[in-house]
Amino acid sequence: MPKTLEVVCTSDDCDLDMMELHYRYSMPDGTGVESFACPYCGSDDSLEELAV
C-alpha cells in the first residue's frame, strides 16, 4: 500500500485544518512534507507532518 502522510498548515493566516497526502508507488524515497506546499494558502514552508 502506498504511503499516507497527514499534514497541517501552521501559518497563522491559513484556515486549513488538516489534509492527507496519498503517495503513488512511484514516489521517490525520502519524499516528505517539505516537498509540498499548502493548497489553501500556498505557503511552501508551513506544512508539518502530524504524528498519528
Image (tube, helix red, strand yellow):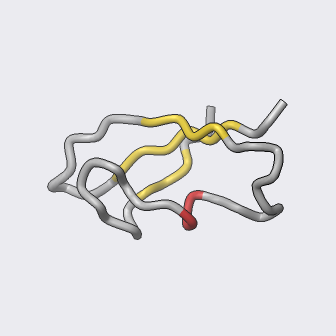
Residue found at the very far left of the displayed protein: 13
Q: Picture quarter containing residue 37?
A: bottom left
* Image vertical order of residue 32 relative to residue 51, above or below: below
- Left or right: 39 in relation to 49: left
Q: Picture quarter containing residue 31?
A: bottom right
- Left or right: 7 in relation to 31: left
At 65% from the left and 59% from the top, the residue drawn is 32
At 43% from the left and 57% from the top, the residue drawn is 47
Q: Locate residue 46, reporting x and y percent.
A: 37, 62
Quadrant (top left/top right/bottom left/bottom right) for the C terminus? top right
Q: Count up the numbered dots.
A: 0
- Left or right: 38 in relation to 34: left
At 33% from the left and 54% from the top, the residue drawn is 10
Q: Locate residue 14, reporting x and y percent.
A: 21, 50
Quadrant (top left/top right/bottom left/bottom right) for the N terminus? top right
At 68% from the left and 37% from the top, the residue drawn is 4
Q: Locate residue 45, reporting x and y percent.
A: 40, 69
